[in-house]
Image: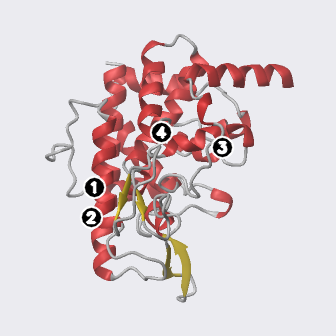
Amino acid sequence: MQNESKRRLFKSRIAIGLLGVMLFTPTLSLGWGAGGHMMVASIAFKRLNPRAKAKANELLAIKIDPAAVTAKSTNFVNAAHWADDLRPFAEFDHFKALHFIDQPFSTDGTALPSGVPEPDNIVKALEDNANILKTSTDKNAQAQALRFIIHFVGDIHQPLHCATRVTSTNPTGDRGGNLVSIKIPGSNGQLKTSNLHSYWDGGIATFPKTGANFAPPPLSQIGPATVIAMKGNPATAAGVNLNDPFNFNAWADESFKLAKTTAYKGMKNGVQPSAAYNAAGTKVVRKRVAWGGYRLAALLNSIWP
């Protein structure tokens, strides 16, 4: 049984064609928190056409490896955090580089590093996995590809998953704000140290919170949070462009610009985000979650019209 499991895992890796990233050192944080990812998926699932919804449910019922993790996320909304649930499994480490695309920029004239962004990144991962859904006849490969797409569409809309700030202190980049230490209020009312990337993963502390050991928030919290995110961010808003659901580069470029103009604005080690910063950031994260949900639905509806 163990050998058979290994053969299935290897076959799945070949199907996705992403073996070349195994030596990459990943960033310290991955994606929106579970709450943000579940919000994106919840918005998308309600917009799926009947065929797309049926295909998604069919694929999510397949018990792909690791079976124990997959069994905890057999519905569309909980499947959104599956890719992050792989963190404890070393055999899946090579997928970590696919959660982001480090597009570098400098704020102090430091030369940009070569070879960045990496050729294996979230844009390529979305292209590869969308192609699997469109062309593969391997149900296990499709099931894995769907889970990655649900997650990666969320990730690519997080601004700090698409940028890395280059400075004399961090000449190779700050890993999407992972290396920027900030001060935020703790549960006891005292300031605690966090990093900029994690702060944005949590929706500027406004999204349903991930529990101990990365436990996802209950589904009961997701619906109300999506209502707030979509308010003022309708699917008809200028720029959403649901007629081009495979333009992953455009989504990454949007996030890159927002990282420079909003996420990194005034942020350096030891800073506590101001009320103005939090207000601007909260507006951005809600919009990006809403747009991610709309675009995820458009993408799957295009694959399964």
Query: Which residue type carries mark 1?
Result: Lys
Residue 121 numbered tag: 4
Which residue is drawn at the image coordinates 59% and 58% (left, top)? 28
Residue 86 sits above or below residue 148 on the image? below
Q: Earlier in the sequence, mark 1 or mark 4?
A: 4
Q: Estimate the spatial distance between the alpha carbons at disc 1 and disc 4, rounded to whole Å.
A: 18 Å
Which SS class for mark 2?
Answer: helix
Q: Residue at x 20, y 30 (%)?
A: 243
Q: Residue 257: which numbered mark, if any? A: 1
Of circles 1 and 3, the one toward us is: 1
* Mark drawn on residue 86: 3
- Dot 1 or dot 3: first in sequence order is 3
The residue pinned by badge 2 equals 261
Q: Residues within 10 Å of mark 2 (few under 14, many from 20)?
A: few
Quarter placement of the N terminus: top right
Q: Nearer the viewer, mark 3 or mark 4?
A: 4
Q: Count every numbered label the image shows and give the total.
A: 4
Cα separation, mark 1 vs mark 3, equals 29 Å
* Image x and y of residue 84, in percent: 59, 47
- Residue 42, above or below 49: below
